[in-house]
Amino acid sequence: MAGSGFRGDPRQLWRAFQWTMQGFAAAWRHEASFRLEAMLVVVVCPLGWWLGRGPLEQLALMVPVLLVLAVELLNSAIEAVVDKASPEFHELAGRAKDMGSAAVFVLLLITVLSWVLILTGHH
């Protein structure tokens, strides 16, 4: 959506923020996986802050968890668009949804790996 006018206009920024909040609300309302992963963020990020030895470890513990949430949002968006475009089953639609789910899973593995490597490295 190309718009005319200054993109840094405070009203434009406020509308963009409102749309972002609508996206979070929709994900919370309609996506059980998002709710579960959001709860994970609420618990795990403060733990990462507390357990990390210094800012780099803290980031290495917290960022993967936040990325899981971001990729879950993208996965949910893909699923919504696929369902809108093709309500009946189609192999490509199923493949797109499965790949989005696989991306979330890969990030979950990266998160677990990061936590295990960092926390087992503490002596």
Image (cartoon, rainbow, N blue to C red):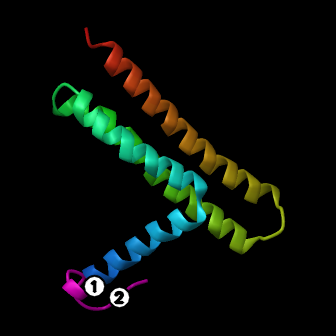
Which residue of the protein is positioned furthest toward the left in this rendering?
Answer: 54
Residue at 32%, 39% (x, y): give it.
Answer: 62
* Mark 1: secondary structure: helix
| Quarter of image, res 24 | bottom left
Could you give the CA–CA distance between mark 2 and mark 1, rounded to whole angstroms? 10 Å
Residue 48 place in picture, x, y as percent: 29, 34
Q: Which of 97/111 is in front?
A: 111
- Above or below residue 55? Residue 70 is below
Circles 2, 1 touching at the beta carbon (< 8 Å) = yes
Residue 122 place in picture, x, y as percent: 26, 13
Residue 59 place in picture, x, y as percent: 26, 37
Q: Is residue 50 left or right of residue 67?
A: left
* Mark 2: secondary structure: loop
Residue 74 place in picture, x, y as percent: 52, 58
Q: Which portion, as a residue range, is magenta?
A: 1-12
| Amino acid type of the residue tagged 2 in the rendering | Gly
- For label 1, the crowd category at 10 Å Cα-Cα, with few meaning under 14, some 14 to 19 and many 20 or more, is few
**Which mark, by number, is residue 12?**
1
- Above or below residue 41? Residue 5 is below
**Which mark, by number, is residue 3?**
2
- Above or below residue 75? Residue 61 is above
Quarter in which the N terminus is drawn: bottom left
Q: Main secondary structure of the magenta part?
A: loop
The answer to whether residue 6 is magenta is yes
- Above or below residue 8? Residue 30 is above
